[in-house]
Structures are given as C-alpha cells and as structure tokens.
Image (cartoon, rainbow, N blue to C red):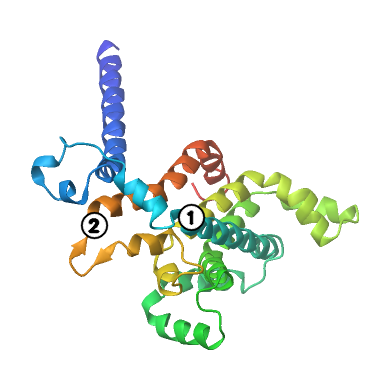
Amino acid sequence: MAIVAQSSKYGQAGRTVLAWAVGLLFFFPIFWLVLTSFKTDADAVKPEHLIWFTPTLENYTNMTQNYDYWRFATNSVITSVFATIFALVVGVPCAYAMAFNPTRATKDVLMWMLSTKMLPAAAVLYPMTFLTKSLGLFDTHFLVILVLCLINLPIVIWMLFTYFKEIPKEIIEAGQMDGVNTWGEIREILIPLAWGGIASTALLCFIFCWNEAYWTVRLTTTEAATLSKLIEGNRAPEGLFFGRLSAVSAAAVGPIVVLGWFCQKQLVQGLSFGAVK
C-alpha cells in the first residue's frame, strides 16, 4: 500500500510539473511579444539586448498618436461583434431545425457545411475582390461583417447542433403540446436550456472573427481596416520594425487574452456541454 501511495504521489507531481511546463510553453510567445514591445527597433534585433535593455514606451506612443490605433481597434470590435450576432441569429434556428427535426439529408448538409472550411481562401480571393469592387462593397464594414459571419457560420452551426442534441426532445414536444410556436420554443425553452453552449459558441466565434487576418487585410484599405491591417502595415522594403510590430501585436492580442481569462469558466462549461468534449 505504501508503494502504491508513493507511486501515486510521484505520478501526481509529474502531471503537475508537466502541466506547468506546457502552460509556460504556450505563454512564452506572449511574454516575448510583450517584452519586445518595450524595446526600440534597434534593440529588438540586437542579440546582446535580448533580456537586458532600457525599456521604452515609444512604440506604444507612436501606435496611439501616429498609427490611429483606436480607429483600427474600433473597427475590429464592430465587425467582430456584429458578425458574431448575425452568425448566432442564423445558426440557432438552423441548428434547432437539424437537431429536433432531422431528415435523411441532415448529416450530408452538416458535412457539406464543414467541408467549406477546407476550401483554400486564396482560391476565391480574385473573384471575391473583383465582385466586391464591382458592387461597391470593397473596404466597407458590411462586407467585412458578412465575410466573417459566413466563414464562421459552419463552426457555429456544428457546435450549436451538438449542444441542442443533448437536450431531451420530450421537453420540446411538451412545449408544442402547450401550444408554443417554433419561435417560442427557441426563445423560451431552447435558449435558456442551452445558454452555456450558446455563450461559449459566441465567445469562440468572436475570437475567430477578431483573429481573422487573411480576408480583413485583403478586402480593406482604410475605412473598415481592422487591427490585422495595422499589424500588416508595419512592413517596409527595408524589413520589419520588430519593436513597433510587437507593440501593435500585443495591443491586438491583449483584449482577447483578457476576455478569455475572465470567461474561461463559461468557455469550459460550454465546451463540456454536449458532444464537443
């Protein structure tokens, strides 16, 4: 018994050390990003200044005063929030129909929607650019919101579908017997029961929209440009400005890190609800 207890103690300690090692491994890039943001562009590329250097706020000052950071951040917030809302407005009824009124084609439709995520974005870049410019939608908030909503809609529907499948169908049938219509079932029964799953889906969709760089960089110039465009702008023919690039990247990553930290309980609860485990 003593040998078993000692072995279990060592195993628990080993798992703790491994968990800390993995956590530090994932956190290190963010730490290095923030550290570099307090260096000048010259110090950022000097090996002797990797750790020991004179901190400066010059990069953050330039970012707010010269790069119009707040305009790009506002565009990111607007496009991410509205794209998430629209994705949920479409995704909730769609997942409800597939979960509680399935047909023979339901699985095929789900697989087809998921297969659209496998399409290389570069394959449709030219027709998307040509079409949006022809319609006068290029570099508009509406275009960015629409694109972000559509590219994340398959994931939203898949996640909501797995959450809704865990809800007993008898509850929905009981509501139908009481005379509740379809929208009443969704509003009064489904959403309260699956609120954790819907919240986690919204959070993940918002993160995906915030982090989207390919389309936001290529379908915008100035008016609807997001933080991804600001980060991409820190390039020049002579190279990358690592100090300024790190400051802008840290300012773009910071809100999402803080949001994930405060919402981690809801996120874990939502991912533990349903088939996504």
When asked about the image quadrant of residue 234, the answer is bottom left
Classify 10 Å Cα crowding around label 2: few (below 14), some (14-19), many (20 and above).
some
**x 88%, y 54%: residue:** 177
Residue corresponding to mark 1:
73
Residue nearer the viewer, 2 or 106? 106
Q: Secondary structure at mark 2?
A: loop
Q: Is residue 83 left or right of residue 7?
A: right
In x, y percent, where is residue 204? 51, 52
When asked about the image quadrant of residue 99, the answer is bottom right
In x, y percent, where is residue 254? 42, 45
Q: Secondary structure at mark 1?
A: helix
Q: Are marks 2 and 1 in contact (CB under 8 Å)?
A: no
- Looking at the image, the residue that sits furthest to the front is 65
Question: In the rendered image of this protein, does residue 114 appear above or below residue 246?
Answer: below
Q: Is residue 120 visible?
A: no
Residue nearer the viewer, 163 or 104? 163
Decide which of tag 2 and tag 1 comes sooner along the chain. Answer: 1
- Looking at the image, the residue that sits furthest to the left is 48
Locate the N terminus by quadrant: top left
- Looking at the image, the residue that sits furthest to the right is 179
Please tell me the numbered disc located at residue 236: none
Q: Is residue 6 left or right of residue 180?
A: left
Classify 10 Å Cα crowding around label 1: few (below 14), some (14-19), many (20 and above).
some
Distance from Cα at disc 2 to Cα at disc 1 = 20 Å
**x 43%, y 70%: residue:** 215
Q: Is residue 35 visible?
A: yes
Please tell me the numbered disc located at residue 241: 2
